[in-house]
Image (cartoon, rainbow, N blue to C red):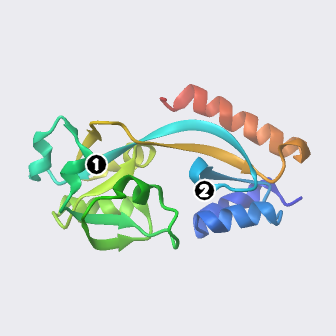
Amino acid sequence: MASVFFFSYCLAKHHYPDIENHVNQEVVDCGFLSAKHRTKIDFIPLVDDEYYVILSPDHPLCRFERIPIEALNGERMVLMDDGGEGYDTMSILKNLSYTVVHWVNEDFLALPLVECGLGISILPKLIIDVFCNTTNVVTKRFAVPRYRTIGIVVKNINDISPLTKLFISTVQDFVKTHVQK
């Protein structure tokens, strides 16, 4: 099997389908994906990551304590383009009418575009916790919370190396200790 340490390159340079393919082809031992994106590989759940609506401080939706999904109808959106149709946010926006004003290739790139009033976005809490403190945006929860489950994927859980087992165990311990659920 490939080195477990190579998987970080895969995550930094590829989209969800690529990560799954690299795990299937044993280019990497494991990778991080949301539960929605894995198909024929084993998935070890780590955390449920809540989605938030990201707004400029003067946006009319800021008046809501929690935003009803229907309130996003007619909005201008800044969304992540993952190179496919599997992006989790698209399932949240299903059945709504909106305009995509800009596609970004990294989640955090949506924040300055939202800050300057170009549109609104939907981002998971793990991204918000890292990047929202550097921009002047407002984060609002949905009236009915929306989540993605983040986990580690491996080709076959019964056939992983001791190093990969140790890595997975270390990540699980870190998540239990440092990531709020």
Q: Is residue 72 left or right of residue 93?
A: left
| Residue at screen point 19% across, 67% down | 118
| Residue at screen point 74% across, 40% down | 168
Where residue 3 is drawn, which disc sits there?
A: none
- Residue 40, position as x, y percentages in the image: 75, 56
Mark nearer the viewer, 1 or 2: 2
| Residue at screen point 71% across, 35% down | 170
Q: Quadrant of residue 90?
A: bottom left
Badge 1 amino acid: Val
- Per the image, the residue denoted by label 2 is 37
- Residue 79, position as x, y percentages in the image: 35, 65
Residue 137 can be seen in this image: no
Q: Nearer the viewer, residue 106 or 121?
A: 121
Total marks placed: 2
Q: Secondary structure at mark 2?
A: helix
Q: Quadrant of the N terminus?
A: bottom right
Residue most toward the top?
177
Badge 2 amino acid: His
User: Quick check: 139 above or below 88?
Assistant: above
Residue most toward the front?
95
Q: Residues within 10 Å of mark 2 (few under 14, many from 20)?
A: some
Q: Secondary structure at mark 1?
A: strand
Q: Residues within 10 Å of mark 1 (few under 14, many from 20)?
A: many
Residue 18 can be seen in this image: yes
Q: Is residue 134 left or right of residue 92?
A: left
| Residue at screen point 57% across, 26% down | 177
- Per the image, the residue denoted by label 1 is 53
- Residue 122, position as x, y percentages in the image: 33, 53
Q: CA distance from mark 1 to mark 2?
A: 22 Å
Q: Is residue 26 left or right of residue 52?
A: right
- Decide which of tag 1 and tag 2 comes sooner along the chain: 2
